Image (tube, rainbow, N blue to C red):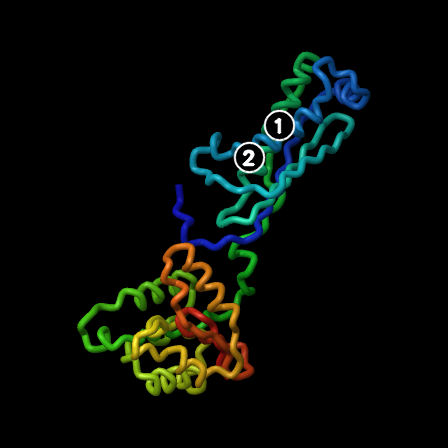
Amino acid sequence: MLDISQKVSTLRSATARAILRLAPATVALVREGKVPKGDPLEVARVAAVQAAKQTPQLIPYCHLLPLDYVGVEFEIAEDRIEVEVTVKAVYKTGVEMEALTGASVAALVLYDMLKMLDQTMEIAAVRLVSKKGGKGDFREPSSPPRRAAVLVMSDSVAAGKKSDEAGRTIVQRLEREGLEIADYRIIPDDGALIAETLIAYANRDRLDLVLTTGGTGFSPRDNTPEAMLRVIEREIPGIPEAARAYGQARTPYSMLSRGKAGLRGAGPRLHALDGRLSSGP
C-alpha cells in the first residue's frame, strides 16, 4: 500500500461503465418485470453501492475511503444493459477503483439473476469513463520550468553547529515537481538580512517561487514573519492558515507557527516564506 499521509484531501470523483450483452428476448423480460428472481436492476443497484464501499476488502492495495456518494444508472438497449457507477469522496486518493468495482459487481449481479434465462450473455466491457480530483486538476498548462529558491534561516545551521535537513528536503520536493532551483542558501536569523535576501530574489533575480524554513516560532531570534511583512505588498492569510491546519493534524506544535505569505509586485511570479507564497514584480 502506498503511503498517502503527506497528500492533501481534495474532492475526488470517478465514473465507470460495465456492459452486459444479452438476447433481446431477455431484455424484454427485464423491461416487463418478468424475471423470476425479481427486479435485477434494483438488486444490481444495491450491490453496486455495497461493492463500492467494500472495495478495500476486495482489492488488497486500495485504501479505506470515506465515500460521500455512490450513484448507479442503467441504460437498456435492444441487446445490452449498460451500468454506470459514479463515486465521490473528499480524500487523499482517487476513487476510480471504487467506481470500477461497483460497475463490475452490478454486471455480475445482473448476470447471476438472468443466467437461467439466457446462456448467451457476456460481460463485454468494464472501463473507467472519467476521473477528477487530486493535484493533476490544479497543474498549470505546460510552460517553462518555474525558477525557485529555498532560503533557510537558522543561526545554528549558518554557524555550522547543526546540519540542514528541512531545506534540503524542500529542494528535493521542488525538483520532483519539475521546478528549477536557482538558489539554495542558509543565513542567520537576522531580520534585515532576511528581508534583503528576499527582496533580491524578487526584484533582482525575478524568481517565480521562494520557499523558506525557520524563524517563525517564539524565540528572541525568530524574525521571519516580521521580515516578511517588510517584503510583501499584499498578504495572503489563507496559505499559512492551510499550512497550519495541515501540520496540526500531524503535530500539536503547528499552531505555534507565525508564518506569513503574500504577493510582491504585480507580475505572475510567486515567492514564499516558510512554504507560504508571495509574488515578485
Q: Which residue is mark 2?
A: 53
Q: Is residue 77 left or right of residue 191?
A: right
Query: Looking at the image, which residue is at 31% across and 65% down?
Result: 166
**Amino acid type at image mark 2:** Lys
- Taking 191 as reference, is 124 above or below it? above
- Taking 25 as reference, is 144 above or below it? below
Residue 173 % position (x, y): 38, 62
**Amino acid type at image mark 1:** Ala
Query: Looking at the image, which residue is at 56% across and 82% down?
Result: 266
Query: Looking at the image, which residue is at 49% across and 68% down?
Result: 239
Instruction: Name the residue nearer the viewer: 145 or 207.
Output: 207
Q: Earlier in the sequence, mark 2 or mark 1?
A: 1
Quadrant for the N terminus in the image: top left
Q: Is residue 97 left or right of residue 254?
A: right
Q: Is residue 125 left or right of residue 164?
A: right
Q: Which residue is mark 1?
A: 47
